[in-house]
Amino acid sequence: MRVRTIAAATFTLLLALAPAAQADVPPAGEITCHGDTASVTFSPGVGLLETKQTLGGRADSADCQPLNADSKVKSASVALTGSSRASCALPSTFNVRNEKLAGTITWHTTDNQTATSQFSVTPDTADRVDINGQGMVVEGRITSGYETGKKVAFSTTWNRQGLLSDLLKCATFSFRSVQGELVTLHVFP
């Protein structure tokens, strides 16, 4: 009997010490978010010759509009990573296309909770990556977490400094980042 009492007390203590679970995930459904900031970084830096780059991106939305009225999603942040080969021989038209990327969307709700979605972009499917001098378009699929199985698409526009500045960065292999705005983030069936 004493063993059961100790086991029950130990179980109760473990439950009390366990970290709180993530809040209830908002109901799934189609979601459209509109922009705030966006950026992409390249390492070691894009130059005149095509080289392999590690890239990272971030986009934040200021306003999400879920189609499901029960959803409490109010905003989202996207982080993505991947690798590519890139060149900016023509700086205003540098291109990164159809590379394999992975990312996470963090959803923020009106009751200050969060949910996450992991997504992937695989170029040998209908997925798409196009990062160029005007902006970025990414289309993939949510592989786990909130909205699993749904498609995700987002696009950005860049704030460009000017052709002369871009030429200098390109010539010195120091074209390492672009910043701009998220135009739209869309999750749909």
Image (tube, rainbow, N blue to C red):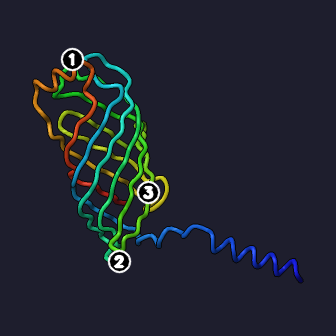
Tell me the crowding category of disc 2: few under 14, some 14 to 19, or many 20 or more residues within 10 angstroms, Cα based. Answer: few
Q: Secondary structure at mark 1?
A: helix
Q: Residue furthest bottom?
A: 1
Quadrant of the image containing the N terminus: bottom right
Q: Amino acid at mark 2?
A: Asp
Q: Nearer the viewer, mark 3 or mark 1?
A: 1
Residues marked 3 and 1 touching at CB (< 8 Å)? no
Q: In the depicted view, which residue is nearer to us: 122 or 27? A: 27
Q: Amino acid at mark 3?
A: Ser
At a point 43% along the width and 46% down the height, the residue shown is 120
Residue identified by numbered label 3: 117
Residues marked 2 and 3 touching at CB (< 8 Å)? no
Residue identified by numbered label 2: 70
At a point 31% along the width and 35% down the height, the residue shown is 41
Sequence-wise, the earlier of marks 1 and 2 is: 2
Instruction: Point out residue 115 in the picture as x, y percentages from the top left corner.
Output: 43, 63
